[in-house]
Image: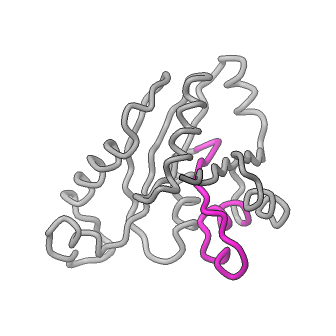
Amino acid sequence: GGTSERIAVECPVPVVVVRDAAPFARWARREAPLRVLLAVDFTESSDSAIRFTGLLRAAGPTELTVGHVFHPGVSSRYGLEPLEIPDDPDASVEALLRRDLARLVGDIGGDGPVVYRPYQGEGRIGDHVLEMASDERAALVVVGTRRKRGYRRLASVSGVILHHGKVSVACAPRVAP
C-alpha cells in the first residue's frame, strides 16, 4: 500500500515487495522456476526493469512473460487501419508488437522460456498488468518507475500494482542519463 509506494518512489535502487515468499524460496532452492511478468512500454523507464529481470534470470531459472498493454489505436503506428471492433485485437498488430517487444528486451540471457504477450486494454494500465499477472500466474511483476510525485502518482502503473495487487512487485527506478 502507501508505505511501499513511498519507498518505491524515493529509493534510488530497485525495491521488491514480497507478498508470498514461497515461490522465491522454491526458486532459491532450485525446486521450481520463478514465474515473472516483466511489464514494459516503449519508454526509457522500462530499461531498468529489463536489466533487473536479466539479473533475476542470471540468478536462477525463470519463466518470463514480457507483457505490454496497448490501446486499440496502436494500429495506426504500424500504418494499419484502426480496429473495427475495439475488443477484438488484430492478430497482425499483436505480431508486430511481439516483434517490437523482442527487440526492446533483446537477449535477456538466463535460463527458462521467454514469451512476449501484447495485451489490449483501455483505462488504467496497472489494472491490466494485474489481470495479466493473474492470467500468467506470475509470482513477481517487474516494472520500471519514473518516480512520480504528488497527483501524478495517481496515474502511476507501479503505484496501482503496489496499492491494489496481491502479487509480489519489483519496482526498478529509471536511471538518470
Task: Count all numbered tags in the image, as a single digit.
Answer: 0
Q: Nearer the viewer, residue 141 or 58?
A: 58
Q: Nearer the viewer, residue 8 or 162?
A: 8
Q: Which residues are magenta?
A: 138-163
In this image, 63 relative to 76: left or right? right
Which picture quadrant has residue 93? Answer: bottom left
Task: Return the x and y of residue 153 as percentages of the image width and height.
Answer: 67, 74
Residue sitting at x 52%, y 68%: 125
Residue sitting at x 70%, y 33%: 23
Residue sitting at x 52%, y 64%: 128
**Residue found farthest to the bottom:** 151
Q: Nearer the viewer, residue 120 or 155?
A: 155
Residue 147 part of the magenta-drawn span: yes
Rendered view: 141 above or below 43? above
Q: Quadrant of the N terminus?
A: bottom right
Rendered view: 130 above or below 30? below
**Residue found farthest to the right:** 3
Residue 145 part of the magenta-drawn span: yes
In this image, 52 relative to 73: left or right? right
Task: Return the x and y of residue 96 as percentages of the image width and height.
Answer: 23, 54
Residue sitting at x 53%, y 33%: 54
Rendered view: 46 above or below 80? above
